[in-house]
Image (cartoon, helix red, strand yellow):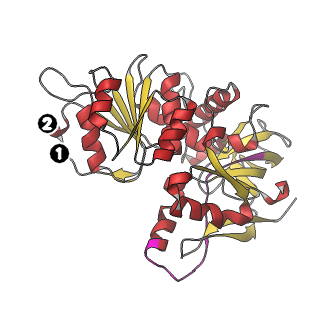
Amino acid sequence: MPSERVVGALDGTGHGCVVTQPIPELRKGSVLVKVHASLISPGTELNGAKKSRQDGATEVGTPKPFGYQNAGEVIEVHDSVTELKPGDRVACMGGGYAMHTDYAVVPKNLCCLLPDNVTFEQGAYTHLAITSLHSIRRGEPVLGEYLLIVGLGLVGQMAGRLGQLAGMYVMGWDMVPFRCQVAEDWGIDGTTIIGQDDEKEKAKAFTRGYGFDMAVMAFGGDGTEALNAVRDVMKRSPDTHQMGRVSLVGGLKTMCGWGAGLGNMDLRCSARTGPGYHDEPWEHGEVEYPPVFMRWTTRTNMEFALRLMSEGKLDVTSLTTHKVPLSDIDEVVSAHIENPGATLGTVLVMPHDG
């Protein structure tokens, strides 16, 4: 077995690079995966790099490895693992585990078998797919309702499609025309380009004057203006109070007037991927959550998302705009920071895949 691996990292100037490090120890409850593809999560992973470039940082410093979603082939399992075996194709997730690397040691409950017709590149989307899935679950969708997605990055795109699968009529908002076009290409029910279109009039027409029942806010940064805009297009009771559920999945920050300022809207945080993630004993299979009480854990969410991909109901391939070797990681880091209007899903291919 190999003793070293190459890992994608970010240096102090905000540029991507590749470093070499020892492969972590195969601890109890873990598997060693020969990674074939990983996916960059631009919102979470590249904010610091963007700021470093904007600030004109010149100190390279010690590069910091990053990444939390990949897919590959199991090549070794700890003696305690019986659910997976060498040769299994798996999707992997988890910060500090499923990095942008050619070899990853991942807890067994953060790995999930890939269906035969799901590629490694598609499987690398699993972490963000179930982040999107959890945001929809948190909003408690109802068949026939109107759903607004604010922010059509990767999470917003997949949340929109999952909302449709839940029987909702979905409109997406974004300031970037390219992202609205991507959503239109996969069949979202409506889009609004913020800054170009009249969002209130389009929302009124889309919901037939009713207003949105649910919204997902899937972006980072200052969200005050966006939350106020969402408030104005949510459904409204006869006493003029806004109503509906708002799922907050992005790392946005807001200043808002609570109480009457937001009417009777329900604001619900959506933390990551579902129960289990960051519970280290659960991740490594030392404890289990009884499924009769907790049907949708991080692992069962992974299984469901991959099933939807396999059945052609959740198309992630259309979200990929760049596919490059790991050695060219700075190319896609720069694309996200310098040309976000034409960059969405960026897949890194590992060295053993050429």
Q: Main secondary structure of the magenta part?
A: loop
Q: Check disc 2 and report its element: helix, strand or loop.
A: helix
Spatial CA span between label 2 and label 1: 8 Å
129 left or right, relative to 7: left
Check the image and report above or below for 211 versus 46: above
Check the image and report above or below for 27 versus 318: below
Point out which mark residue 7 bears. none
- Kind of residue sitting beneath label 1: Gly
Quarter of the image that includes the N terminus:
bottom right
Q: Residue at x 57, y 37 (%)?
A: 298
Q: Which residues are magenta?
A: 54-72
- Kind of residue sitting beneath label 2: Ala
Q: Is residue 117 magenta?
A: no
Q: Residue 105 at x, y = what percent?
A: 72, 54
157 left or right, relative to 281: left
Residue at the outermost bottom position: 59
Depth order, front residue of 12/171: 171
Point out which mark residue 260 bears. 2
Q: Is residue 57 magenta?
A: yes
Q: Check disc 1 and report its element: helix, strand or loop.
A: loop
Depth order, front residue of 343/119: 343
Depth order, front residue of 141/146: 146
Q: Residue 251 at x, y = what percent?
A: 40, 51
230 left or right, relative to 327: left
Q: Are marks 2 and 1 in contact (CB under 8 Å)?
A: yes
Instruction: Provide the residue designation for mark 1.
Output: 257
